[in-house]
Amino acid sequence: MQYSDNTVLKNLKSRYDQFTNVEKTIANFFINNKETTKLSSKSIAEKLFVSEASLSRFSKKCGYKGFREFIFEYEKNISKYNKEEISNLVINTYQDLLDSCHRMIDQEQMKKVAHLLTTSNRVCVFGMGSSGIVAEEINLRFMRLGLNIESVHDSHRIKMLSSLANKDSVIIAISLSGTTKEILQGISIAKSNGAKVIMITSNRSFHLVSFCDEIILIPTIKDLEAGDCISPQFPVLIMVDVLYTYFINTECYYKTKLSTLNGLFKFEDESILI
């Protein structure tokens, strides 16, 4: 078996959703560990309260012959990330997310969502916390293209605007976890009023289907939402950039852009006269 830099950690992260609860406990330890000492099967089993047999099964599930081969490659892996090379860890994490975003892009879905935006009368972007910052970024970018759009990150305004939504409205909801209470309440109200709902999330749960017309899935890594290492909204911004590109390539876009430019030129002419 041939290995490249960071292969072990990439392997663990890519298989994470397939692990059992015990295996996730083991995976979490190795993903977060930065030490190369006391990594014997006995010491790790005692520390994690699992059996050595569980460590062996975990290693084989990850594609290794056994725990000894796994730990050999793992030690080589983490030795690269000392304090002098911490920037590599950050860059590699961004690269992993970028690669994952590329694999997850659904071109037909992007075309459909872009069409929904160009044919709507009004678009509202919901986001709480750091997602609210991204909502504002979406608002500013698409407003420049002539879209009637507004960003909302206050729970009370989310409820009010959801109540005012109708069949000509589109709601873009951002929630990495897909469990933000205020967001779910808002899109539920908007959906019941006939609005189209687009959710950007890393949550693959089927319960979101009843709230949403389109779910744009984004990749995630453990503790990404906490923002300890990198921006938790990085994958959201990537997908928004892709959607933005699809939007400006729709026929309806050119009509809205022309209208916006005409309005700007008219405003500038009136300013000159004043």
Image: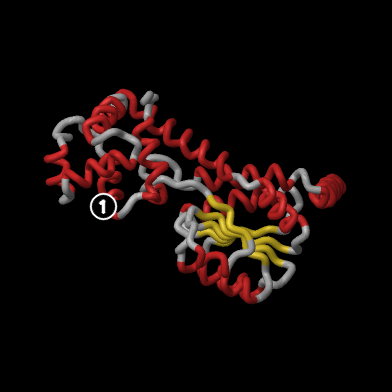
Residue 207, position as x, y percentages in the image: 50, 67
| Left or right placement of residue 95 versus residue 36 in this view | right
User: Label 1: how many residues lie within 10 Å, few (<14), some (14-19) or many (20+)?
Assistant: some
- Residue 83 visible to an observer of this rendering: no
Q: Position of residue 42 (x, y in %)?
A: 12, 40
Direction from residue 177 to residue 45 in the image, left or right: left
Does residue 80 sit above or below 55 in this rendering? Answer: above
Going 67% across and 71% down the picture, which residue do you hit? 165
Three-letter code for the amino acid on which mark 1 is drawn: Val
Residue 74 at least partly seen? yes
Classify mark 1: helix, strand or loop.
Answer: helix
**Position of residue 245 measured from the top left corner of the image (x, y, whole percent):** 70, 42
Asked which quadrant contains residue 33, the reply is: top left
Q: Which residue is mark 1?
A: 22
In the rendered image, the vertical position of residue 122 relative to residue 46, given as above or below: below
Tell me which residue sits at (86%, 46%) in the image.
269
Front one among 153 and 241: 241
Nearer-the-camera pick, 96 or 228: 96
Residue 20 vertical position relative to residue 44 in the rendered view, above or below = below
Q: Is residue 125 above or below residue 110?
A: below
| Residue 59 at x, y percent in the picture | 28, 39
Write the residue at 45% across / 47% down: 220
